[in-house]
Image (tube, grey):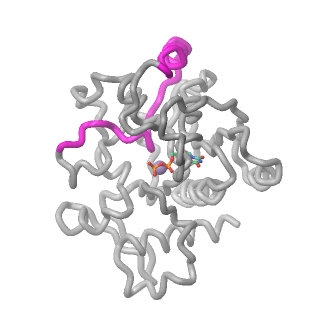
């Protein structure tokens, strides 16, 4: 079976994220290769940086976002629909897609045992009414007919949030009821909610001078407009005074620094 981790970079801004993600996968002995889908807005200089890493670069054409959210776009929603090209990687039997704003805290290769469209309702432990999957981490078995159907419905199906995630949830309307596809929360944990998750549920996360201690935290997702690379590492202060979100940002920076 041909398998790989996959991430996507629509523009130069996410280079930092790809490097930290790559480093985190490597440090936790995730042996499969990382494929990086690279959109047309990425410059040749940035592609040059990526070529220094043993990752597989795959140039992809843009899939335009048809929603009105692209007007006054502050978070790059313009670039997000092209992520759907992960469903076009027919040369692979199974892939694990991770957003470029994620890092792993341990080996996650058991995800390759999960079925097509396994994903997490990220954040559900705080928002009980959420039922959609988060498209930041998905287990995918690429199929030509599925991808053709996606392309054919891209301008037809609604996207509740104006991103690929809303579209994909419209495309898979029965996902909500297919509980065998609902992955454990540990595979897609919003960084800003680590504090709450650890205080209220069976999660543990500490990143201190002694290193990383995590329980039920396998993949951290820095969801939202502010990414770890927007925080100045020097301004974070001392590890022992940080809350869990800040600790997760410090962890991200340490992965990043070790990658460059
Ligand atoms: N992305 C990108 N450039 C952008 C915005 C998004 O390359 O300007 C890609 C990147 O892989 C990112 C994914 O699309 O991880 C989804 O966007 P993001 O993670 O920012 O959304 P969030 O998880 O915050 O909802
Ligand atoms: Mn993301």
Does 145 appear above or below 20? above
Is any part of residue 203 visible from this angle? yes
Q: Quadrant of residue 167?
A: top left
State left or right for residue 79 relative to residue 183. right
**Residue 111 at x, y = what percent?**
42, 40
Q: Nearer the viewer, residue 72 or 150?
A: 72
User: Which residue is at 42% across, 74% downward?
Assistant: 247
State left or right for residue 198 relative to residue 95. left
Quadrant where the image shows the N terminus: top right
Q: How many marks?
A: 0
Q: Is 189 a magenta residue?
A: no
Q: Quadrant of residue 118?
A: top left
User: Which residue is at 59% across, 26% downward?
Assistant: 92
Give the extent of the magenta segment.
129-155
User: Which residue is at 53% across, 72% downward?
Assistant: 231
Q: Quadrant of residue 197?
A: bottom left
State left or right for residue 256 relative to residue 172. right
Does 239 appear above or below 201? below
Q: Nearer the viewer, residue 237 or 50?
A: 237
**Residue 187 at x, y = what percent?**
37, 49
Quadrant where the image shows the C terminus: bottom right
User: Which residue is at 49% across, 25% downward?
Assistant: 141
Q: Nearer the viewer, residue 188 or 212?
A: 188
**Residue 30 at x, y = what percent?**
54, 50
Does 188 appear above or below 260? above
Is any part of residue 52 visible from this angle? no
Does 101 appear above or below 121? below
View extreme (top): residue: 145
**Residue 154 at x, y = what percent?**
50, 22
Q: Nearer the viewer, residue 257 or 226?
A: 226
């Amino acid at each position: 079976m041909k398998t790989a981790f996959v991430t996507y970079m629509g523009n130069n801004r996410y280079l930092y994220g790809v490097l930290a993600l790559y480093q985190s996968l490597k440090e936790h002995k995730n042996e499969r290769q990382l494929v990086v889908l690279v959109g047309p807005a990425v410059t040749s200089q940035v592609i040059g940086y990526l070529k220094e890493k043993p990752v597989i670069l795959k140039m992809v054409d843009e899939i335009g976002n048809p929603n009105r959210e692209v007007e006054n776009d502050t978070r790059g929603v313009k670039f997000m629909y092209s992520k759907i090209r992960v469903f076009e990687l027919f040369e692979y039997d199974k892939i694990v897609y991770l957003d470029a704003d994620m890092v792993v805290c341990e080996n996650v290769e058991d995800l390759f045992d999960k079925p097509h469209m396994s994903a997490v309702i990220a954040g559900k432990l705080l928002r009980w009414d959420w039922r959609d999957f988060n498209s930041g981490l998905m287990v995918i078995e690429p199929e030509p007919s599925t991808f053709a159907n996606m392309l054919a419905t891209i301008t037809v199906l609604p996207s509740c949030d104006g991103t690929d995630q809303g579209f994909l949830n419209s495309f898979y309307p029965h996902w909500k009821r297919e509980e065998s596809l609902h992955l454990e929360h540990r595979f897609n944990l919003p960084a800003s909610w680590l504090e709450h998750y650890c205080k209220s549920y069976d999660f543990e996360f500490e990143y201190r001078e002694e290193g990383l201690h995590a329980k039920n935290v396998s993949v951290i997702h820095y969801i939202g407009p502010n990414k770890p690379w927007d925080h100045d590492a020097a301004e974070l202060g001392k590890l022992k005074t940080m809350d869990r979100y800040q600790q997760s940002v410090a962890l991200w920076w340490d992965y990043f620094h070790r990658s460059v």
